[in-house]
Image (tube, grey):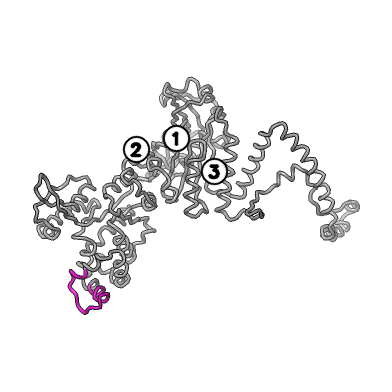
């Protein structure tokens, strides 16, 4: 059984949002976008740890529009499919469609602060029910983001002990009773020995002396330190979770290790509790990456995706965890005019189809881009170095504005554009003005690759192939480059005049030539030779060049090279 969709209306951040979900769903988005609110909406209907009193609505649960108007009602509708479990079918008979689907709905009224829970085969057939009786067979296990790890571990430990106790065989129970009797006698002996320790008895002598002075009632009364006459069950209940390595006991470790232990305990308890014949369990974990280094974040993501016996929903800010998810399983929450919604309505095939073109090249960089307010797409490492340095000297803090600079590294710009469009992440691109040879019906022509790359990114039709003599320089001279730039720049697609090295030499000729002269130990050099040198070992020489000329970069703040960066900043601020 699966949760396939949620529809939220008038609830907290969500004015009217439809969100598709997958078997393993990752929910991402900026801080305060509503990830926790989305999870809480699901908990209202499915978390049996919330009492009926706890799911009563509050004023703060109702959406407030940008104009300050508060919704009078709210509704949360959860759609289920693939309902095949016998216990669920028997419990919800009459409320499930022939194709194994049904819906649950929570509605509330702000004026009376009352709520109703409804169930039905379809949204149009929903009927009110007096209680959440379905929780006996359908429920959600939840781990919140702000978790006291030690408290959580102790809580989960007690539950695990309880479940293990209940699952013992008769033979194991009898053996345990005999063993507990032996432990009880041993504890009595330990209690006596502790009471007779000199410093334990002596620690309260002065207290007893003062009590004797206060009242006659204390003449036969004595305060003492002891073990509390620990009984066997108390002793077991106070067991602490320890660890060992190479046979030696060790402390559990820092929060990162404890977080992993918590997840293991949680899963172990869930497996013991889970009865697939009588219940369906959904799992929700907020920010599982807490306190973990990148490798362990990725490992934990794999663990949550593959090892839990049911549908999982994870919220995260981690690119490492994001990189482990199929893109069509990612819900990217966004805020538009004060209303939270999911890009492409949540988990979407259009994202998956776009991502398929990346194949094995999927890496941490695209995953990081999912968290950006704007992505600047560039050709390669040299451009990343240059625009990162230029941003510093234009006082554009890329992290402050959540701008990612992403190198396409030979992959088509259109692939990244499709993905970013599907995730509704604004983008700007800068590409070389490539012109290449092509033959059409054996006629040699020139393919305007750079121009058509920009045009395709913004949805314009391709320009026809040009005559054989066409070059990058001739496109500058005949006005084709300028005409293209006027069409594509406003929509975020920037075409180099030639490439980064030529364009940089055009705006900072003296600085570029001076750097190359110094490297080659020459007094003078023409700019063409300087450009050719830069192109020899692009990234290495770009890094060296920037180290020498960085102080002069503010001089080109009004030039063409700075425009893509300024455009990205404007989109991030919007």
Which residue lies under the disc numbered 3? 143
Q: Residue furthest bottom?
A: 523
Indicate which label's residue lies in the foreground, 3 or 2: 2
Residue at the spot 9% in from the left edge and 54% down from the top edge = 468
Q: Is residue 14 left or right of residue 225?
A: left
The foreground one among 356 and 555 is 356
SS at badge 3: strand
SS at badge 1: strand
The foreground one among 403 and 63 is 403
Magenta span dominant secondary structure = helix
Q: Is residue 170 visible?
A: yes
Residue 281 placement (x, y as % from top left): 53, 34
Residue at the spot 13% in from the left edge and 59% down from the top edge = 476
Q: CA distance from mark 1 to mark 2?
A: 29 Å
Which residue lies under the disc numbered 1? 74
Which residue lies under the disc numbered 2? 349
Whether the magenta-drawn stretch holds residue 167 is answered as: no
Point out the stretch of residues depicted in magenta.
513-530
Q: Is residue 53 visible?
A: no
Q: Quadrant of residue 82?
A: top left
Examine the rendered structure and indicate whether residue 172 appears above or below residue 414.
above
Q: Is residue 2 left or right of residue 143?
A: left
Q: Is residue 506 left or right of residue 44?
A: left
Sequence-wise, the earlier of marks 1 and 3 is 1
Residue at the spot 44% in from the left edge and 44% down from the top edge = 34
Q: Is residue 199 left or right of residue 505?
A: right
Q: Quadrant of residue 14?
A: top left
- Label 3 neighbour load within 10 Å: few <14, some 14-19, many 20+: some
Residue 269 placement (x, y as % from top left): 60, 39
């Amino acid at each position: 059984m699966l949760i396939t969709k949620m529809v939220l209306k008038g609830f907290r951040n969500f004015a009217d949002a439809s969100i598709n979900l997958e078997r393993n769903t990752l929910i991402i988005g900026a801080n305060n976008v509503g990830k926790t609110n989305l999870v809480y909406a699901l908990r209202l209907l499915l978390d049996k740890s919330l009492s009926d009193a706890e799911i009563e609505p509050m004023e703060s649960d109702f959406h407030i529009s940008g104009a300050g108007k508060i919704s009078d009602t709210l509704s949360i509708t959860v759609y289920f499919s693939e309902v095949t479990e016998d216990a669920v079918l028997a419990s919800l008979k009459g409320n499930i469609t022939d194709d194994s689907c049904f819906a649950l709905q929570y509605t509330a009224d702000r004026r009376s602060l009352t709520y109703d829970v409804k169930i039905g085969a379809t949204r149009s057939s929903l009927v009110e029910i007096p209680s959440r009786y379905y929780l006996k067979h359908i429920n959600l296990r939840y781990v919140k983001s702000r978790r006291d790890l030690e408290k959580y571990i102790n809580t989960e430990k007690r539950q695990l002990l309880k479940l293990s106790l209940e699952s013992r065989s008769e033979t194991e129970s009898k053996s345990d009773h005999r063993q507990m009797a032996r432990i009880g006698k041993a504890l009595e002996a330990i209690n006596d020995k502790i009471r007779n320790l000199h410093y334990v008895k002596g620690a309260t002598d002065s207290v007893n002396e003062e009590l004797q002075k206060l009242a006659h009632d204390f003449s036969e009364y004595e305060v003492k330190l002891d073990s509390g006459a620990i009984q066997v069950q108390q002793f077991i209940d106070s067991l602490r979770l320890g660890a060992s390595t190479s046979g030696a006991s060790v402390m559990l470790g820092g929060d990162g290790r404890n977080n992993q232990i918590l997840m293991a305990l949680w899963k172990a308890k869930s497996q013991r509790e889970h009865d697939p014949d009588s219940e369906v369990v959904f799992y929700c974990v907020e920010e599982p990456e807490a306190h973990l280094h990148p490798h362990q974040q990725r490992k934990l993501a794999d663990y949550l995706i593959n090892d839990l016996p049911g549908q999982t929903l994870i919220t995260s800010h981690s690119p490492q965890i994001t990189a482990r998810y199929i893109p069509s399983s990612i819900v990217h929450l966004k805020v538009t005019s004060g209303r939270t919604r999911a890009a492409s309505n949540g988990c979407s095939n259009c994202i998956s189809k776009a991502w398929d073109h990346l194949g094995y090249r999927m890496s941490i960089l695209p995953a990081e881009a999912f968290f950006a307010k704007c992505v600047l797409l560039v050709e390669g490492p040299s451009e990343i170095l240059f625009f990162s340095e230029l941003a510093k000297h234009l006082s554009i803090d890329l992290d402050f504005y959540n701008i990612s600079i992403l190198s396409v590294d030979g992959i088509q710009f259109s692939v990244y554009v499709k993905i970013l469009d599907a995730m509704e992440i604004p983008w700007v691109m800068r590409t070389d003005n490539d012109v290449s040879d092509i033959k059409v019906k054996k006629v040699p022509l020139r393919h305007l690759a750079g121009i058509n790359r920009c045009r395709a990114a913004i949805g314009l039709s391709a320009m026809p192939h040009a005559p054989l003599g066409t070059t990058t320089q001739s496109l500058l001279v005949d006005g084709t480059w300028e005409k293209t730039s006027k069409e594509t720049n406003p929509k975020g697609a920037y075409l180099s005049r030639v490439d980064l090295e030529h364009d940089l030499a055009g705006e900072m000729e003296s600085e570029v030539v001076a750097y190359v002269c110094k490297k080659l130990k020459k007094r003078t050099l023409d700019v063409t030779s300087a450009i050719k040198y830069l192109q020899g070992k692009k990234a290495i020489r770009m890094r060296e060049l920037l180290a020498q000329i960085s102080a002069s970069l503010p001089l080109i703040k009004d030039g063409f090279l700075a425009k893509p960066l300024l455009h990205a900043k404007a989109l991030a601020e919007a």
